[in-house]
Amino acid sequence: MSEDAETNLVRKWRKGLGLTLDQACDLFPKRGFERPSIAKMSRIERDQIVPLDDVPAVAAVTGIPAKELRPDLAELLGVR
């Protein structure tokens, strides 16, 4: 699958920066968040829903808006 065809936003972000999973995980503590495990990041990249508790950290580190990471919550909360 080409990077342009990638649908998972977190994977597309990581690959766009040319980072390994380990390197991506290392960015979290640099921005004041607990470092996620490689397994957790891998699960998120395999289209597992970003766990609610992790949305703020993933959004802050990746720059992907929370409403794009979890559109189900945005809809539920009326965020557009």
Image: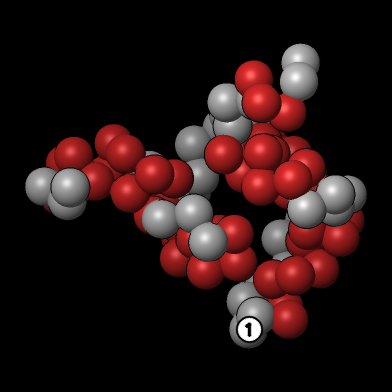
Could you tell whether 71 is left or right of 30 in the image?
left
Q: How is the image coloured?
A: secondary structure
Could you tell whether 12 is left or right of 79 in the image?
right
Q: Which residue is mark 1?
A: 32
Residue at left 33%, top 49%?
67
Question: For the view shown, which residue lies furthest in the front direction?
Answer: 4
Residue at left 66%, top 26%?
4
Amino acid residing under circle 1: Gly
Question: For the view shown, which residue lies furthest in the left direction?
Answer: 78
Q: Is residue 31 above or below residue 35?
A: below
Residue at left 65%, top 80%?
31
- Count of picture labels: 1
Q: Is residue 51 visible?
A: yes
Where residue 34 appears, as percent x and y from the top left, is: 67, 73
41 vs 1, nearest the viewer: 1
Q: Is residue 39 above or below residue 57?
A: above
Q: Is residue 65 above or below residue 11?
A: below
Q: Is residue 33 above or below residue 59?
A: below
Where residue 47 appears, as percent x and y from the top left, is: 58, 29
Where residue 60 appears, as percent x and y from the top left, is: 52, 68
Could you tell whether 62 is left or right of 17 in the image?
left
> In terms of secondary structure, where does tag 1 sit?
loop
Q: Is residue 54 visible?
A: no
Instruction: Give the quarter of the figure containing the N terminus.
Output: top right
35 vs 78, nearest the viewer: 78
Where residue 73 appears, as percent x and y from the top left, is: 27, 44
The crowd level at tag 1 (other Cα within 10 Å; few <14, some 14-19, many 20+) is few
59 vs 53, nearest the viewer: 59
